[in-house]
Image (tube, rainbow, N blue to C red):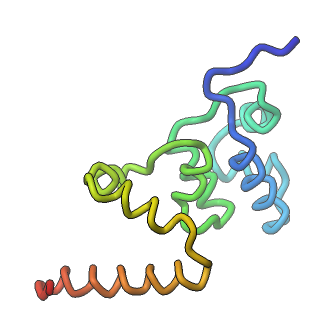
Amino acid sequence: MRSELKHEAPEGFITLIREGMGKREISLNQLAERAGVSPAFLSRILNRQRGLPSDKTIVRLAEVLDIEPVELLLIEAGRIPEAFKATLSRPQIPALLRATGKLSETDMQKLIKMAQAFALKYAKGKPK
C-alpha cells in the first residue's frame, strides 16, 4: 500500500505538465534538462512518488513549457504566487472572487478588461 505524500502533486499540476510536454513535443528528459532538474526527480513528481518541488522549480517548468501565465502552474500546485499575496490579503478579495465564480467566460473577459483599465488609470495617477 502506497503511503500518501504530504505535498503530492495535484492532478491539475501533473496534467498541465504532461499537456505542455505534448504541445512542445519534448520528452521528460528534455524538460528536466531545460528546467535544471534531474529526470528521475521530475519522473517521481509526475508519478506521485515525491512531493512538489520548490516554487522556483515550478516557475522554471512553466517557463520551459510556455505555460501562460506562469502563475497558473503554481496555482495548480496549490501554491499562492508571491506576486499575488499582497492583493489576496485585501479583505475585499474573497467577496470579489465569490461574485465572479458563476460568470460566463465572456463576462469574465469583460471584467478582466475593466479591471485592467482601472489599474491603468490608477497607475497613471487618475483614479476615479
Tell me: 121 left or right of 32.
left
Quarter location, residue 120: bottom left
The residue lying at 45 percent from left, 46 percent from top is: 80
Residue furthest right as drawn: 1
Question: In terms of depth relative to the viewer, which is nearer, 120 or 45?
Answer: 120
Tell me: 71 left or right of 104.
left
Residue 121's spot in the image, x, y percent? 21, 87
Residue 125's spot in the image, x, y percent? 11, 84
The residue lying at 62 percent from left, 21 percent from top is: 6
Judge whether 32 appears above or below 93 on screen: above
The residue lying at 56 percent from left, 42 percent from top is: 78
Judge whether 22 appears above or below 35 on screen: below
Q: Quadrant of the C terminus?
A: bottom left
Q: How many marks?
A: 0
Residue 84's spot in the image, x, y percent? 37, 55
Judge whether 123 appears above or below 81 on screen: below
Quarter location, residue 48: top right
The residue lying at 88 percent from left, 11 percent from top is: 1
Question: In terms of depth relative to the viewer, which is nearer, 81 or 31?
Answer: 81
Tell me: 79 left or right of 40.
left
Tell me: 57 left or right of 51.
left
Question: In terms of depth relative to the viewer, which is nearer, 37 or 13?
Answer: 13
